[in-house]
Image (spheres, helix red, strand yellow):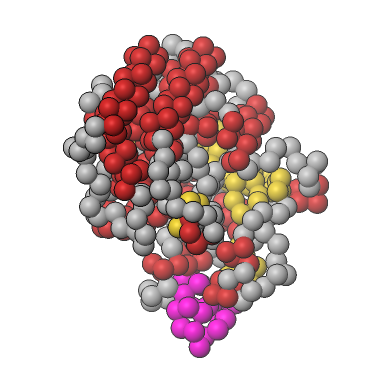
Amino acid sequence: MTNSRSNVPNGCVFRDPAFMANRDAPIHRWVPWVAGYSKHFVEDAINRHAPEPGVVLDPFAGVGTTLVEADHAGHEAIGFEINPYAAFASEAKLKAHRVNLGLLQDSVERFSVFMEKGVKEGIRPKTTPPTAFRTRAPFYSPKVEQKVLLALDFIAQQELRIANIYRLAFAATMVTYSNYSYEPSLGRKATVGRPNVDDYDVAEAVSDKILQMANDAAWYRETRSKRKRKDGRIFTQSFFDGYSKIKESSVDLLITSPPYLNNYHYNRNTRPHLYWLGFCSTPNDMKYLENLNFGTYWQNARDCDQIELDPSIKDRAIRKTIAEVRRKNPDKGVYGGKGWANYATHYLNDCVRFAKGAAWCLRPGSTALVVIGNSVLQGVPVPTDQFLAKIAESHGFKVIDIHIPRDTRVGSSILNSSVRANKTNKVSLYEAIVELRCT
């Protein structure tokens, strides 16, 4: 195994995978996303490892960066995503070339008239807020909420494909005019010194987004390689449960980024989108998604009996690290090393499940690229990239390299947390790309 960290930044063969690069890219900019990687990274991966049309897989697809780039380049794109909002966004992007641009553009004027009349006349919306969606402070101020509900009334009257574009435009803008923001986790604007949003032109925000999406859809239709072929596919389910739907040894390139070992609540941070778009209606729906999450969450694992590493994980460094975390702060019970060791063990066991599924899908000689970040738990460094590589070696892969395109990344919630890291500043966080070859 080699490691390209010593060559940072110019020696790495991949560009910075940070998702922020997607903010101005057609199609990719349709929805903001806290986690994920850039289109440029996927471009590099495809050019290097899949120059001819083939099958590209992303087991943790998020909002579809891999799928869109693969589809646009002429590949068959397949993805799995447990979060129904993210899967919805991915599917909408993959079908951008099918949007009826005339109907969509004509609808914007009707939407503006509908909204103006509703606000001016004080029309009572038929749509109601999701009853189970609870926040510490009102998510929307009264004036904003009335406009949001009117917008949803309009959306409900549209043909399905047009309605779905509007739903996504609303989802992409909905936090902007709320009393919440991402810092990076979802929280009240007031807690970070920002004022609540008393009023906002919701119609203009959604209309502007729709027009941007229409322009992008036109570009996608025009530039999509080999247009007469089937669309990319996204399965709204766990890769672990669904990978057998893919023909064995049929995938030519796997590009993905599973959740990091940082206890970030990927599903919880999309609660507004899940509830307001109707993907969740009860807390049990959210709990179900949390239980599906790669590596679960510390809050779910900490109270369990001691979780043991999968028997196939025999690497001494991995086992030593888990044992070291478990010994930390025994006086704190599950809030000490015991709970965090359970969390890390569950995560590494899911790395085993991932490796097995990936080995099933990939043809011999093909490549898997996994973007992953290291971590620190209870002051103990956890080189997740190296551990994933060692696990993969036990399940049908050869480790070609570990590239480090970003030798620093933001992680104050990890490094400055007394329960996670004992406020250590001796460990730097980096982002790695683990390059594997299926044998």
Q: Picture quarter containing residue 110?
A: top left
Residue 101 or residue 177, whichever sits in front: 177
Residue at 50 percent of width and 43 percent of height: 33
Residue at 27 percent of width and 58 percent of height: 283
Q: Relative to residue 211, is residue 296 depicted above or below?
A: below
> Residue 49 vs residue 310: left or right?
right
Q: Is residue 89 visible?
A: no
Residue 325 drawn in magenta: yes
Residue 14 or residue 95, whichever sits in front: 95
Please provide percent x and percent y for residue 175.
43, 45
> Residue 421 vs residue 232: left or right?
right
Please provide percent x and percent y for residue 102.
37, 11
Q: Relative to residue 301, is residue 44 depicted above or below?
A: above
Residue sitting at the far front: 120
Residue at 45 percent of width and 67 percent of height: 298
Q: Is residue 19 visible?
A: yes
- The stretch of residues the image draws in magenta is 322-342
State the count of labels.
0
Residue at 45 percent of width and 57 percent of height: 188
Q: Relative to residue 335, is residue 125 depicted above or below?
A: above
Please provide percent x and percent y for residue 196.
44, 53
Residue 232 or residue 353, whichever sits in front: 232
Q: Relative to residue 38, is residue 352 depicted above or below?
A: below
The secondary structure that most of the magenta stretch takes on is: helix
Residue 336 drawn in magenta: yes
Question: Is the C terminus in the top left, top right, bottom left or bottom right quadrant?
Answer: top right
Q: Picture quarter containing residue 113?
A: top left
Q: Picture quarter containing residue 149?
A: top left
Please provide percent x and percent y for residue 228.
44, 11
